[in-house]
Amino acid sequence: MVAGEPDESSCLEEAVYEGDGSLSGSGRMTRPVSGMGFHTLDDFALRGKRVLLRIDINSPVDEKTLRLEDGSKVKASIPTVRELVDRGARVTILAHQGRPGDYDFIPLNEHAQYLGQFLSKKVRYVDDLLGPHAIKAIDSLSDGDCILLKNVRNFPEEQAKKTPEEHAESALVKTLSPKFDLFVNDAFGSSHRSHASLVGFTAVLPSAAGRLMEREVRTLTNVIQSPKRPSTFIFGGTKFADALPVIQKLAERDTVDNILVAGLAGYTLLWVLGNRIGSKTEALASRDLTQEVRDGAKKLVSTYGTKIHMPIDAAADVNGHRREFKLHELPTDAAVKDIGSDTIEKFRRIVLESKTVFLSGPPGVFEKAEFCKGTCDLFDAIIESEAFSVIGGGHSSAAANKLGVLERISYVSTGGGALERLMMGKSMPGIEALRASAKRF
Ligand code: 3PG
Ligand code: MG
């Protein structure tokens, strides 16, 4: 495998190491011991080392107050920050929030407060990225200190479509890289982006994956490549067009036994196949339904029909109340908001027999008590099954959190777009850049 090459399956494969495995002068192992082709924190001595750490703490922001809705994304980065600090590194953190022009493109002061709170240690926010204030703050760090620089998307070329080598020529990388001994990428949730702060430093600095990145890649690769069987992948949520390419790729895999499609995505699929789902549901379903998606969906079911399981009944909103109907009995103007009891029972049986269960997107409008049953009962089945369970995407973890079962899920991924891309077997620029760096340094 050539690192950095857009090989369709490269993100899932262990790179073959070709170095000599010797200790370099800086006390680091040149051989990645992770077995994933990139270095991890295990490969480096850290005391006194100047570490540039990229994390993904891009959080939901309240549109009115412009405050973070919660600190859960910040919390996921804590193990790596804590380890770097505890092992005596001098840590400078780079992160983004929102995109220029969007309401959630805000400074990172509050993120720094959350970091400090979770670490029980002051994390100074420096409102500068590569100017004299940033450089002074970096230079004045002592062992175990930690600062957070300004939102990296203030750098105009951060999001430019460039290769790692081209990004390495940017002012961001040229100015900051001489200040550091090691670059650590723990931003799994952003690793599908080829942005300067994610791929530029790997070209010029020894680089390692942080603990979150390491865990995400290891766990998700296992679940996709060699899940314990029978394996069941549940898709819910509202966007069938987004789920379809992922479902198509999974369906092709021999190790994937069942794909359950619920939520609006499931009813959209039923509609494409010729079922009526009620005019209000159809209006929602039609929003991103192109001819290409329709054709793809039909082909999916005709090719892999035995693996694909769809709802057989539905719970609709009738004057604000839950009413269940067989599919063919749905009122013509129905607004479907959850899977019905027969579907729940059918899906429950499949889940109970599974050894691996992956869930992306809730099966119903779990936020409303009347329409939470499908989500609630499926989560119960997942826990009862004792399968290795993985959930991904912000809405799934919000649902698990609301239902109080988050702690009982085996693995909760922080990835949204990144997870989707990984599941499709597509190359991940942030991960490939780490692998390329491991061959160079
Ligand atoms: C995310 O939250 O999806 C990641 O932080 C990446 O952000 P982006 O989608 O704005 O590139
Ligand atoms: Mg995103």
Image (spheres, rainbow, N blue to C red):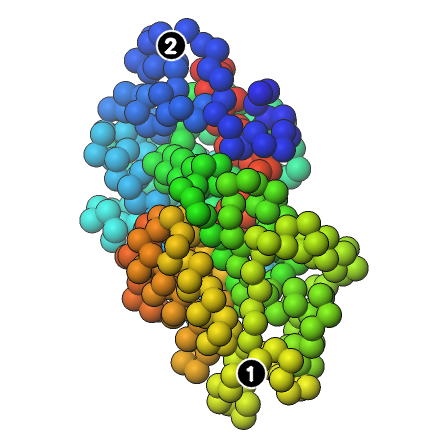
Q: Is residue 347 above or below residue 388?
A: below
Task: Depth check: give the residue in front, 93 or 125.
Answer: 93
For the point 33% across and 21% down, the residue is 43
Q: Residue furthest bottom?
A: 319
Cα distance in 3D space between marks 1 and 2: 64 Å
Q: Is residue 168 above or below residue 308?
A: above
Tell me, yes or no, whether the two marked residues, 1 and 2, touch with CB atoms within 8 Å.
no
Q: Residue furthest right?
A: 291
Task: Give the secondary structure at mark 1.
Answer: strand
For the point 63% across and 55% down, the residue is 305
In this rendering, the count of numbered labels is 2
Task: Depth check: give the residue in front, 260 or 122.
Answer: 260
Residue 236 percent across, percent down from the top left = 53, 63
Residue highlighted by disc 2: 21
For the point 71% across and 65% down, the residue is 273
Task: Depth check: give the residue in front, 83 or 7.
Answer: 7
Q: Earlier in the sequence, mark 1 or mark 2?
A: 2
Please give the label number shown on residue 325.
1
User: What amino acid is found at the position of numbered circle 2 in the picture?
Assistant: Gly
Residue 320 percent across, percent down from the top left = 51, 90
Q: Is residue 295 visible?
A: yes
Task: Depth check: give the residue in front, 363 or 397.
Answer: 363
The image quadrant of residue 162 is top right
